[in-house]
Image: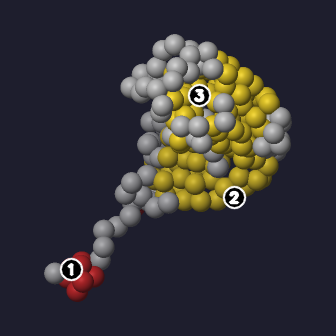
């Protein structure tokens, strides 16, 4: 929240990202006059960084749950270029900036198989967190996870508590399958524990 120059407190909810390029971002903008004036029906304008208005709405009569801010829902078009995009919500002379990361539309399946190589077991490992940039999944009981990613270079990270972290960089130009191996991390060497902690 922010207090504007005209004693209007504002908030924006729903600017969570990332979002796909060219999509619509639905946000809720709330406002409250700190002087006690009614803001019912007051216009909310959303402008892009260049100053052009891209959306507008009007504050309703009901306060956002758990707050005293009147609010409205506004649909903001997301630009077609990937990257961080910023807007400002305006109520009278008060403004509140918000931003969101726009990412390319996923076009390919990146399938991951996690293998536990502890003691040469080579068994599938469930519950591994797998992430490639903004795209994430968790391996199922068969040790498999699938991420939908856009074409390009991706650094894939995989981790699970008690196991070694794995990272690899790959080019994705079509659907891809990859196997990654990790093993249980051994506890600290007993001699190290005796020397440094006892």
Q: Residues within 10 Å of mark 2 (few under 14, many from 20)?
A: few
Question: The residue tagged with tag 2: helix, strand or loop?
Answer: strand
Residue 101, located in which quarter of the rendered image? top right
Please name the residue shown 59% across and 37% down the image: 6
Of the 4 image quadrants, the one containing the C terminus is: bottom left
Q: Determine contact: label 3, label 1, CB under 8 Å.
A: no
Foreground residue among 76 and 56 = 56
Q: Earlier in the sequence, mark 2 or mark 3?
A: 3
Residue at x 53% of width, y 41% of height: 3
Q: Is residue 183 toward the left or the right of residue 80 in the image?
A: left
Residue at disc 3, secondary structure: strand
Q: Residue 147, how many percent across, how many down?
A: 63, 38
Q: Residues within 10 Å of mark 3 (few under 14, many from 20)?
A: many
CA gap, disc 3 and disc 1: 53 Å
What residue sits right under mark 1 in the picture?
Answer: 197
Q: Which residue is at a point 76% across and 53% down the rendered structure image?
A: 153
Confirm whether residue 109 shows in the render. no
Q: Are marks 2 and 1 in contact (CB under 8 Å)?
A: no
Q: Is residue 31 above or below residue 136?
A: above
- Label 2 – label 3 distance at C-alpha: 40 Å
Residue designated by label 2: 169
Residue designated by label 3: 29
Q: Which colour assignment does the render follow? A: secondary structure
x then y, percent, for residue 51 = 81, 39
Number of numbered discs overlaid on the protein picture: 3
- State left or right for residue 72 relative to residue 77: left
| Residue 31 percent coordinates (x, y) | 54, 29
Which residue lies at the image location 63% right of the left edge and 53% below the top edge?
A: 156
Label located before the other in sequence (2 or 1): 2
């Amino acid at each position: 929240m922010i207090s504007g120059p005209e004693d209007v407190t504002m908030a924006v909810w729903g600017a969570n990202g990332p979002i796909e390029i060219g999509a619509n971002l639905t946000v809720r903008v709330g406002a409250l006059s700190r002087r006690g004036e009614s803001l019912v029906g007051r216009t909310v304008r959303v402008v892009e960084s260049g100053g052009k208005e891209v959306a507008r709405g009007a504050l309703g009569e009901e306060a956002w749950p758990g707050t005293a801010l009147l609010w409205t829902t506004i649909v903001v078009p997301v630009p077609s270029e990937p990257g961080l995009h910023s807007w400002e919500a305006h109520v009278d002379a008060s403004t509140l900036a918000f931003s969101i990361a726009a990412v390319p539309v996923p076009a390919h399946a990146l399938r991951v198989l996690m293998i536990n190589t502890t003691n040469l077991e080579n068994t599938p490992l469930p519950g591994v967190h797998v992430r490639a940039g903004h795209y994430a999944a968790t391996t199922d009981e068969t040790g498999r996870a699938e991420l939908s990613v856009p074409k390009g270079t991706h650094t894939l990270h995989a981790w699970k508590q008690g196991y070694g972290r794995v990272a690899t960089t790959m080019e994705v130009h079509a659907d891809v399958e990859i196997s990654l191996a990790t093993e249980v991390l051994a506890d600290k060497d007993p001699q190290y524990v005796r020397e440094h902690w006892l």
